[in-house]
Image (tube, helix red, strand yellow):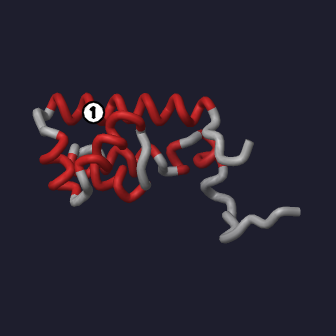
Amino acid sequence: MAGMTPLPVARAMREIAHALDLARRQQRIPVELLAERANISAPTARALLNEGKGSLENFLRVVRILGLLDHVVAATDPFNTPEGRLRADEDTPRRVRRS
């Protein structure tokens, strides 16, 4: 089972890839130009836009070119979650170890 992508993750990858490709098409940016601006190869850009596959760095390079980087950063801010807001005043440990 190790190495298999969980279904919710696979679904999110497809949805994010579709959204990025839609943003690219709305901005009338050819894949080759997006790849050049992001300093990645065209096949790498296509894999990211078609399947959601690629590295975090390449994903962030593409969202920056599409003008979505600030939104991605905000979406991952733990203080934007109910749990994060609830625990905002607590002393957060630097590391969490298994018991």
Q: Is residue 18 above or below residue 49?
A: above
Q: The residue tagged with tag 1: helix, strand or loop?
A: helix
In the image, taking residue 61 as reference, residue 29 lies left or right, namely left
Residue located 74% across and 42% down the image: 1
In this view of the protein, which residue sits in the foreground, 68 or 82? 68
How far across and how far down the image is residue 11, in percent?
A: 52, 29
Q: Position of residue 86 (x, y in %)?
A: 64, 46
Residue placed under numbered mark 1 in the picture: 21
> At 35% from the left edge and 55% from the top edge, which residue is drawn?
58
The reply, left or right, for residue 42 in relation to residue 16 is: left
Q: Residue furthest right?
A: 99
Residue 98 occupies quadrant: bottom right
How many discs appear?
1
Query: 85 or 24: nearer the eye?
Result: 24
Compared across the picture, whether 39 is left or right of 30 comes to right
Q: Residue 94 falls in which quadrant of the image?
A: bottom right
- Quarter of the image for residue 49 reads top left
Q: Residue furthest front?
A: 43
Q: Residues within 10 Å of mark 1 (few under 14, many from 20)?
A: many
The relative height of residue 75 versus residue 15 in the rendered view (above or below) is below
**Looking at the picture, how far across and down is residue 88, in whole percent?**
60, 54
> 67 and 48: which one is in front?
48
Residue at image position (67%, 64%) is 92
Q: Amino acid at mark 1?
A: Asp
Rendered location of residue 21, percent (x, y)? 27, 33
